[in-house]
Image: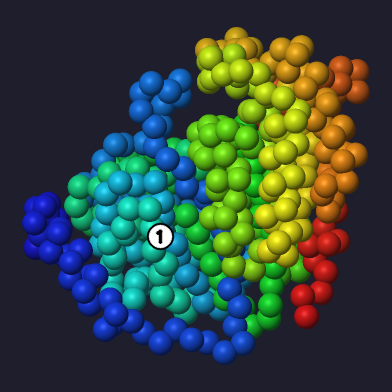
Amino acid sequence: MPYKLKSIAALSLATALQSASLAAAPDTKSKDQYWVTSWYAAPQSSWDSTFVLPTNVPVYLDNQSVQENVRLSAGGQRIRVVFSNRYGKEPVLVGEVRIGVAGESRSYQRLSFSGLPGISILPGATATSDPLPLPVKPLANLSVTTYLPSRTAVGSFHWGNQQTVQVTAGRAAEAPHAQGGDRIEGRLFLSAVMVETAEKRRTVVALGDSITDGNGSTPDANHRWPDYLANRLAPYGVAVANAGISGARLVSDGMGQNALARLEHDVLSQPGVSDVIVLLGINDIGWPGSPFAPTEAPMTLDRLAAAYRQLVTAAHIRGVRVTAGTLPPFEGALEGTPFAGHYSPDKEQLRRKFNQWIRTAGVFDAVIDFDALLRDPEHPQRMRPAFDSGDHLHPGDEGYRTMAQSIDITSFIRSTK
């Protein structure tokens, strides 16, 4: 069959994959083995041109391959890969996926889904691969190439230039290092890599906005604060899953659903999750009245506190500890850009009140005072220049490294036996 598949051929392939899946499903049971989420990119819904920021991804892909790299946190003997169509309105037909340790060409292997080489992911659903015997070390870099044989709407993706992917024509899965194509910022459908270990391990989830997602860090360098935290936890076998979304908010929807709406998917359903570190609220405070939400009413402390209490309740019911981070200073945020208006004296006053509530409310299992860590001692409403990426809202590489170094990891590495 030629690469340029017709719609009817694509539909036939999807039907064949679905109808054969139960009969072909392998026995994947493994005694005394444990799965943890070793890498994660939180899915978010695509938006149209009426929003102030572009998605920077195609509306459709057609007979193309998506090649991307991911850096794991924990290692293991087998892996599973998860693809998400959480916000899509049409099925996503995955024709083939090849994966291997980056730089080791002989290690590239084909994934299977219920015993088949591909799968049709229904709208709102995810697809999890069968276990693949691929021993990976902590902090290993994987290369994943996904072939999409037919016209595929990009309704669910992950936004941001901290990671780029390569999109090439045709079945580049046969050549994992294919040259050419287009570089795209973000993630397309790939959302998680899980690893299997013989001993019970933990996953720490970082739930946040663009500061957790690493805006302002060096692209393709894994310099987000959760990446630096993964470096510290790797010797202890503890995984870190980054559930940061640029533009995410605690109370309202932003460039992704509000925190309570995505808590189940992005945090509580992660295998091995024991802890969540939450750093949210600066967009709830900064967006109203700015180009991001020009008609939205100002945020209030009561609304922020109520949302955090609900989040903690939901996590504690599932046995997950909650650590909250105070909001870093943001005076001058996005000045001189089309997005000016993120900061104001009134918003700064609310940020300080909210931080004080986080420190003193007694709601959380632990608190990390990122505000005290990152602020300029001579000008406390502004970020210290050495930590500032330059936009006065997001830290740079050194700021993110310092954030991770400040975290007390004692509770994360406690015995799991």
Q: Position of residue 220 (x, y in %)?
A: 54, 44
Asked where in the image residue 14 lies, by quadrant, the reply is bottom left
Q: How many marks?
A: 1
Quick one: 185 or 255, which is closer to the camera? 255
Does residue 72 appear left or right of residue 320 in this picture?
Answer: left
- Reply above or below: 115 against 261: below
Q: Quadrant of the C terminus?
A: bottom right
Does residue 92 appear left or right of residue 186 in this picture?
Answer: left
Q: Position of residue 289 (x, y in %)?
A: 59, 14
Q: Judging from the image, what secondary structure is the residue with disc 1 in?
A: strand
Does residue 196 appear left or right of residue 115 in this picture?
Answer: right
- Reply above or below: 146 against 198: above
Q: Position of residue 362 (x, y in %)?
A: 88, 46
Is residue 398 in view from this perspective?
no
What residue type is disc 1 on?
Answer: Thr
Is residue 192 in view from this perspective?
yes
Please tell me which residue is depicted at 33% across the width and 81% down the height of the picture. 25
Quick one: 322 or 10, which is closer to the camera? 322
Asked where in the image residue 97 lies, by quadrant, the reply is bottom left
Q: In the displayed orientation, state which residue is furthest to the bottom.
A: 31
Q: Position of residue 27 (x, y in %)?
A: 41, 87
Asked where in the image residue 390 lies, by quadrant, the reply is top right
- Reply above or below: 341 against 99: above
Please tell me which residue is depicted at 57% across the width and 89% down the height of the picture. 31
Query: Can you identify the residue that label 1 sits on?
Result: 126
Q: Quadrant of the N terminus?
A: bottom left
Render colour scheme: rainbow
Quick one: 177 or 114, which is closer to the camera? 114
Please tell me which residue is depicted at 39% across the width and 46% down the height of the picture. 87
> Badge 1, how many Cα within 10 Å: few under 14, some, many 20+?
some
